[in-house]
Amino acid sequence: FLEAHYRLGISLYKQGRMDEAMQRYSEVLRIHPDFAEAHNNLGVVLYNKGRIDEAIDHYLKALRLKPGYAEAYNNLGGAYLLKGDARAAMSAFQAALRINPEYESAQKNLQIVSIPQQ
């Protein structure tokens, strides 16, 4: 049932049903704690709920499990940026682009963080 829980989490997230999506991803991780994509997606839900530190923890877990996961690096960068850590954000976006140089979201995010603050 792991895949069913995971796909249901994706569907619930797309419907804006964050609490239910969080429950599904949590269930996936209870069954299979090494599911990098579920950690990343749970991080996205937590980020959207304003729970940035918890989101960062899940992005980092995803990256420990799957070091070449460009999306998790991009999401991590966004979380760091929201916390005001531009240096860490830039590093995460650059890591995403080293993995996938054509990753448009990471390219845009890197441009945003590279703009000098006034």
Image (tube, rainbow, N blue to C red):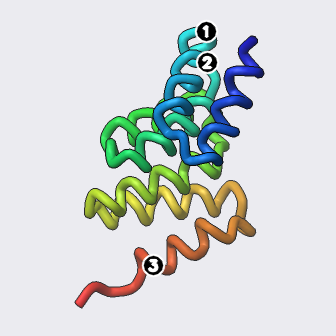
Q: Which residue was labeled with disc 3? A: 112
Kindly indicate the quadrant of the structure image that contains residue 117: bottom left
Q: Which amino acid does label 3 sit on?
A: Ile
**Image quadrant where one finds the C terminus:** bottom left
Disc 2 residue crowd, few under 14, some 14–19, many 20+, Cα 10 Å = many
From the viewer's perspective, is residue 13 above or below residue 38?
Answer: below
Q: What residue type is labelled 2?
A: Val
Q: Is mark 3 on a helix, strand or loop?
A: helix
Residue under the image location 58 percent in, 24 percent down: 24
Q: Which of marks 2 and 3 is nearer the N terminus?
A: 2
Q: Which residue was labeled with disc 1? A: 31
Residue under the image location 34 percent in, 64 percent down: 87
Q: Earlier in the sequence, mark 1 or mark 3?
A: 1
Residue under the image location 33 percent in, 48 percent down: 50
From the viewer's perspective, is residue 55 above or below residue 109?
Answer: above
Q: What element carries label 2?
A: helix
Q: What residue type is labelled 1?
A: Ile
Q: How far apart are marks 2 and 1 (CA)?
A: 5 Å
Q: Which residue was labeled with disc 2? A: 28
Kindly indicate the quadrant of the structure image that contains residue 98: bottom right
Residue 1 point in image, percent of width and height? 75, 11
Could you tell me if the residues under marks 2 and 1 are in contact, i.e. CB atoms within 8 Å? yes
Residue under the image location 33 percent in, 66 percent down: 86
From the viewer's perspective, is residue 101 above or below residue 96?
Answer: below
Q: Is mark 1 on a helix, strand or loop?
A: helix
- Left or right of 92? Residue 104 is right
